[in-house]
């Protein structure tokens, strides 16, 4: 019984004193830092996915084409529809087909079999997890 009382007393005084408030504020700030840190790691992990494509593609809005077209908004747009980019004949022959999730998956898994004779020299993402992550990443870039 005494112990209980003591507990209640200490809790009360923690809440009331300046020290108690500062402590709560400290915990709160710590929590916010943890959340920011976690969000930051997720963001950089996402950008790492694109490292394999970076040599040939930009993906930010309005960025210029490199060896390959800028991929901003590629999810859901038509094949070979980036303005100002010179596509191969193999690509131009497929204009009017949409980059749906299925098509993007097939393409990125094995570019040479999805569009033979394209200019994109890339073996493909063989691991299902990489492919899943890439599709999710492309969806966010539009
Ligand atoms: C060696 C250079 C190279 C690399 C690496 C590369 N690409 Fe490409 N990519 C190209 C080229 C070139 C084209 C245009 C193909 C054509 O016109 O035949 C293209 C086209 C594309 C297209 C079709 C764009 C459109 O407007 O229709 C997508 C989607 C794409 N690439 C995604 C990727 C992704 C995702 C990666 C990374 C996993 C990647 N590429 C890696 C060179 C590359």
Image (cartoon, rainbow, N blue to C red):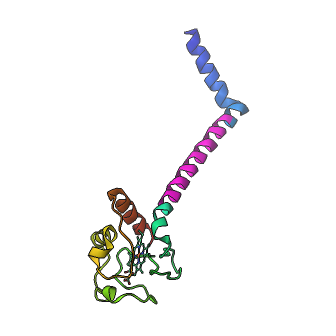
Where, quadrant-wise, is the C terminus in this rendering?
bottom left
**Residue 60 image offset from top left, x and y in percent:** 51, 74
**Nearer to us in this view, 73 or 115:** 115
Q: Position of residue 131 (x, y in %)?
A: 35, 62
Is residue 24 in the magenta section?
yes
In the rendered structure, which segment of residues is drawn in magenta?
23-46
Residue 3 colored in magenta in the image: no
- Left or right, 83 with reference to 90: right
The residue that appears at 44% across and 88% down in the rendered structure is 85
User: In which image quadrant can residue 94 be found?
Assistant: bottom left
The relative height of residue 16 versus residue 133 in the rendered view (above or below) is above
Quadrant position of the N terminus in the picture: top right
Q: Quadrant of ligand 1?
A: bottom left
Q: How many marks?
A: 0
Q: Main secondary structure of the magenta part?
A: helix
* Residue in front for this viewpoint, 101 or 85: 85
Q: Is residue 100 left or right of residue 2?
A: left
Which residue is found at the position 38% from the left and 85% from the top? Answer: 81
- Relative to 12, say whether 5 is above or below: above
52 or 138: which is nearer to us?
52
Looking at the image, which residue sits at the far top?
Answer: 1
Q: Position of residue 29 (x, y in %)?
A: 63, 44
Say which quarter of the image contains residue 107.
bottom left
Residue name at image x 66 percent, y 28 percent = 14
Q: Position of residue 116 (x, y in %)?
A: 29, 80
User: Which is more toward the observer, 61 or 23?
Assistant: 61
Q: Quadrant of residue 93?
A: bottom left
Q: Residue at x 64, y 30 (%)?
A: 15
């Amino acid at each position: 019984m005494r112990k209980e009382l003591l507990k209640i007393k200490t809790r009360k005084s923690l809440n009331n004193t300046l020290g108690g408030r500062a402590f709560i504020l400290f915990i709160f700030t710590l929590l916010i830092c943890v959340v920011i840190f976690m969000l930051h790691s997720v963001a950089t992990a996402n950008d790492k996915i694109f490292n394999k494509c970076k040599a040939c593609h930009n993906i930010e809005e309005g960025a210029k084409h490199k060896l390959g077209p800028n991929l901003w908004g590629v999810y859901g747009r038509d094949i070979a529809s980036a303005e100002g980019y010179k596509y191969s004949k193999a690509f131009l022959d497929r204009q009017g087909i949409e980059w749906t999730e299925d098509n993007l998956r097939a393409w990125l898994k094995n570019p040479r079999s999805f569009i033979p004779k394209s200019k994109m020299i890339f073996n493909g993402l063989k691991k299902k997890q990489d492919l899943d992550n890439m599709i999710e990443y492309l969806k966010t870039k539009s």
